[in-house]
Amino acid sequence: MKKPFVWLSLLLVLALTLSACGTAATTEPPAVETQPPAVEPSEPPAATEPPVEETTEAPVETEAPTEPATEEPVAGEIDCFGAEGTSVSLLYQWSGLEEENLTNILQPLLDACDITLEVESTRDQAILDTRVQANNPPDIAFWNIAQLEQYADLLVAIDDLPVAQENYADFWRELGSIDGTWYGLPVKADVKSIIWYSPVAFEAFGYTVPETWDDLEALVEQMVADGNTPWSMGFESGDATGWTGTDFIQDILLVTQGPNFVQGLIDGTVAYNDPAVAEAYELYGRWARDEAYTVGGAQGTLSTGFNDAILAVFADPPLAMMVKQSGFAGGTIAETYPALVYGVDYDFFQVPGVQGLQGGTDWMMAFSDSPAVQAVFAYLSSETGARRWAEVGFDITPNLAGAEGYTNESLAKRADMLYNAATLVADVGDAIPGGFGSAEFRAVTDFVNGADLQPLLDNLAEIQAQNTGQ
């Protein structure tokens, strides 16, 4: 009696299995709609040829805002200039988080106007040159100040675009003008004339933030007398080794000679072998080559990476009391020492006595005046665009309307320095074309390594004259 029951059970299981398989074969999962990325490169970045000009400093590390950017402008605050449903091509040097930040900043405009971005990201200026020479430039390029002069004849003047010019300090017009015509809108700025330190260490040794250059020199000597190393000045950076040294020397010149002198170096009316330049190098060298003043003396300056030089000040125990570095140092500190609190464990102050800030910016330049281009320029120069830029925290917007929008305290402090500066002077090496910046790096490196100064400055003066027409 057991066998019929077994066969009946097997037939029942087989029937149920076939029924389940039939159901699975005829049932499809619900369709899932996918959205394409907000920004998609029109083609892969090409990097098959070396850049025409080397990047003169390391890429900026962007600090994340302390809070996400949540405030969305209403559509009525954005003027589309008839660009609805069109596209605009952008070419820039940013990638990764920086590229994401720019997209985040532009997103309200893209949403309000249904504008599509066609982007190309590359650090190779030859790509931009090739596009221009082929009569196929991007609608908008974000590049360096030297390219404003290089492409001036092809660019749309800022006066012919819907830019809220009242939102920019006068020195931006001056810096972005070629032969009296304003061609470049500054968009992403940073200041270099700052010194990072540990408030905790300063308090422990009874040090106070110096208010004048004389105060700074006295503080340095007091630190040495106390057995502390004042500076961490390492500047190793591969092919760009030396760039932090040239920044330091330029700030010394902004203290001792002022911004008009430094601008004269840029335009060639002041020769680079001027005695005042030699004096600035000698002062820098006194600190950068002596182990009493900087970590490791000359060898430490030459061989220590610039990021490691930043971190030395915030090690436990600290290897030095101060490091002069651009605003990106805050991101380096926060990433390596996440337990440290800005304003408590690390902070910065402006180089005391500077008569104008040393700084840099990326410049937005237009090869087209299409409605979408007009919409982008109008948006980024507006109060809405400035507030968005500040909230995202993509370094500092030169647009004064962004002053109240920063959620990152460090950025807000640096922005306040920039917005209240009497003037801003570009990095000399960045502003003089023809490889001057690289030659300047080599010169300061050779100087720290013990080479005679005057021949180095004479050679730089010759390169300066060749590339400034003086």
Image (tube, rainbow, N blue to C red):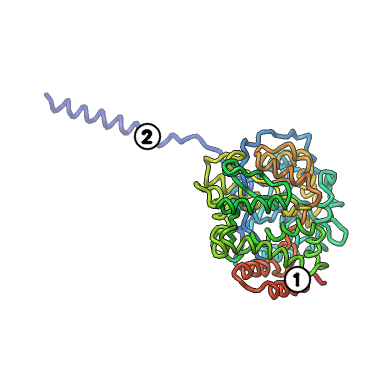
In this figure, which residue is indicated by the disc labeled 1?
273
Image spot of residue 117 (x, y percent): 68, 49
- The front one of 60 and 19 is 60
Q: Closer to the N terminus: mark 1 or mark 2? A: 2
- The front one of 145 and 312 is 312
Residue 22, disc: 2
Mark 2 crowdedness (10 Å alpha carbons): few <14, some 14-19, many ≥20 = few
- Give the residue furthest to the left: 1
Quarter that holds the C terminus: bottom right
Q: Residue at x 20, y 27 (%)?
A: 8
**Which amino acid is tagged 1?**
Asn
Q: Quadrant of residue 444?
A: bottom right
Mark 1 crowdedness (10 Å alpha carbons): few <14, some 14-19, many ≥20 = many
Image spot of residue 375 (x, y percent): 78, 45
- Give the residue furthest to the front: 225
- The front one of 101 and 91 is 101
Q: Is residue 151 visible?
A: yes
Quarter that holds the N terminus: top left
**Which amino acid is tagged 2?**
Gly
Residue 138, disc: none
Task: Judge left or right: residue 56 versus residue 263.
Answer: left
Q: Distance of mark 1 from mark 2, alpha carbons?
A: 88 Å
Compared to residue 29, the image places residue 279 above or below, namely below
